[in-house]
Image: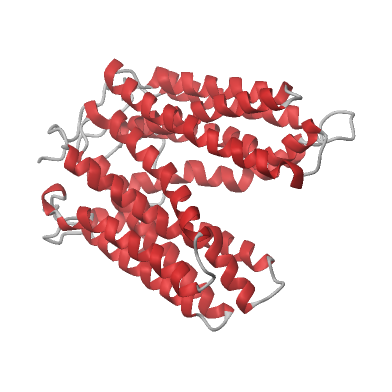
Amino acid sequence: MTIGTGPATASVPVAVAGPRTPVGRGFVVKLLLAIVGTGIAYTAAMAYSLALRIDQLAPGREEYLGYLTGAGGAFSMLLQPLLGVYSDRTRLRFGRRRPFLAGGALIGTTGLAVLAAAPDMTILTIGWLLTVLGWSMAAQTATSSLQADLVPEEQRGRVAGLAGFATLAAPALGVGLASLGTGDPVTLLLVPGLIGVLLVLPLVATGSEDIPATEPREPLDLRRLFGKLLFDPRREHDFSWNWLGRFLFYVGLTFNTTYTTYLFAQRLGTGVSEVAGLVTAVAGAGMVATTIGALGGGYLSDRLRRRRLLVLLAGIVFALGAVVMALSVGVAGLIAGAALSNLGMGAFSAVDQAVLLDVLPDRKEAGRFIGIMNYAHQIPHGIAPLAASVLLTLGPSGDKNYAALYLAGGVFTVLGGAVIHLRVKGSR
């Protein structure tokens, strides 16, 4: 299969560069298994097992969990484009992506073993960073880059929708697996890791999908390496606008997901602990709505050959849900608003991923640019809660102003969709 290298720019109405041969069901199934496997291994550790090990090694120091997860998040954010750069530059006969997929699973499982056996917090920290490094390498670099390398334009929406479904299912399976544990750290950590390896293996074992790169590599020193963490918005117009649109959408999304429990408690006039069951049920229903949005949005974007309009509509649907939640004082309204927002979130994530694959500036550097794009939804998770704390204080009432927060979130999601719809020209 020949990988196209022509960049999509603002002067090109439709980006058609890239793979032409349709991918088969076998590849899609193996891709989805790899996404689920990496998600199970990582989520099972983060959702429960890491907290258990901290409690065993440093009883009463719950703040250590925040320190470790925060450090892991920052580490992952820095790693993604760097791993992408090295994956793009790999010239092994096994391909560019498979070495990172296999190596990531191996490093991630080693990290889980270190977590299980750690005698103190220092070793536990090392194990956690190895876990983040390995499974980030496998999930965020290899599988996303393979989509960019191999999925042709007419299949990108459907494959992105299925990948979104797998990404949603994996954490639920990981948490469920962790909840079945006996408290033994070896079982809690290594069993999900081994499941992850087994589910990644089919994609690693079949080499026909990962075509080795043959072009000579440019020299790479530290200055050039860290320069690849950035890009020139003046040259990469479509990529830049898509980055900004995704950033704005995820600011709004973070506004409307961080304080859900507190919103429910305020509107229902009860304590936070009393709404825990309702929030859990709404989250489960929300996952169903997100899945419908991802699968439906991806399918429609391929069938209608329209992506940018669907991205805008997804932002509007999310905003409608935010408005309903902002104005609701009863359970029915809160549930309906959450369902609408999740539907929009699922559609946006799938269709905008297809837009990204359409407008990658250089397919030879797909790993690098996908890593940079990940900043657009990771940075909001750090800054949006700080801005949200200001919005909550608006108004004369002594209560937290969740209406202002949720309405602002809706505005941001519409802005994000509008930027992509109006400014990105390299995707239909």
Q: Is residue 424 left or right of residue 182?
A: left
Q: Position of residue 84 (x, y in %)?
A: 32, 53
In the rendered view, would you say 144 is above or below 247? below
In the rendered view, would you say 423 is above or below 217? above
- How many numbered badges does the structure rendering display? 0
Q: Position of residue 25 (x, y in %)?
A: 18, 38
Q: On the rendered image, what quadrant is the N terminus found in?
A: top left
**Which residue is rendered at x = 34% and y = 27% of the image?**
298
Residue 226, can we see it? no
Q: Position of residue 295 (x, y in %)?
A: 37, 29
Asked whether 241 or 274 is in front, the reply is: 274
Q: Is residue 121 left or right of residue 5?
A: right
Residue 179, can we see it? yes
In the rendered view, would you say 56 is above or below 93? below
**Which residue is rendered at x = 64% and y = 68% of the image?**
64
Q: On the rendered image, what quadrant is the C terminus found in?
A: top left
In the rendered view, would you say 257 is above or below 188? above
Q: Position of residue 234 (x, y in %)?
A: 40, 34
**Which residue is rendered at x = 58% and y = 45% of the image?**
381
| Figure colour scheme | secondary structure
**Which residue is rendered at x = 71% and y = 25% of the image?**
326
Asked whether 223 or 161 is in front, the reply is: 161
Residue 260, picture quadrant: top right
